[in-house]
Image: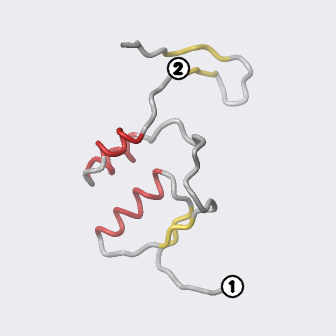
Amino acid sequence: MFAEQVKVLIVGAGGGGLALSLLLLQQGIHPLVVERRETISWYPRARNLNFRTMEVFRSLGLSDDIHAAGGHVSRIFAREYLASRKDRRSWIPHRS
């Protein structure tokens, strides 16, 4: 084990963590990003990126790359609350 001092530690290489690290790098701040997984997960962990994260990626010129890497939505369900067992279909995309 080794010790390292950093000014900014970002835990998690999800959309928010990666966007933050890019913004800090633009300001000359070199954060350390740590992620518990060694490789990219092929299983989806998030269904989308929030609006602000996408605004940041867009301002960095990465919007097209992110959209190209994303999957297509098959359907979306809504629940009254997270632990609810009852859900309703809220959106089905049109197929071309």
Count the numbered circles shown.
2
Tell me if label 1 and label 2 are in contact, CB under 8 Å: no
Q: Check disc 1 and give the amino acid type.
A: Met
Q: Is residue 11 left or right of residue 64?
A: right
At 44% from the left and 16% from the top, the residue drawn is 93
Earlier in the chain: of badge 1 and badge 2, it is 1
Could you tell me how far apart the alpha carbons at marks 1 and 2 are, in whole angstroms?
46 Å
At 47% from the left and 26% from the top, the residue drawn is 73
The circle drawn on residue 75 is: 2
Residue 33 position (above or below residue 71): below
Residue 72 position (above or below residue 39): above
x and y percent of residue 47 in the render?
A: 52, 36
Residue 42 position (above or below residue 90): below
- Element at badge 1? loop
The quarter of the picture where residue 25 lies is: bottom left
x and y percent of residue 87 in the render?
A: 66, 17
At 61% from the left and 14% from the top, the residue drawn is 88
State the residue in front, 82 or 35.
35
Q: Check disc 2 and give the amino acid type.
A: Arg
Quadrant occupied by the N terminus:
bottom right
Quadrant occupied by the C terminus:
top left
x and y percent of residue 84 in the render?
A: 72, 24
Residue under numbered circle 1: 1
The circle drawn on residue 53 is: none
- Element at badge 2? loop
Q: Is residue 13 left or right of residue 60?
A: right
Badge 2: residue crowd in 10 Å (few <14, some 14–19, many ≥20): few
State the residue in front, 14 or 50.
14
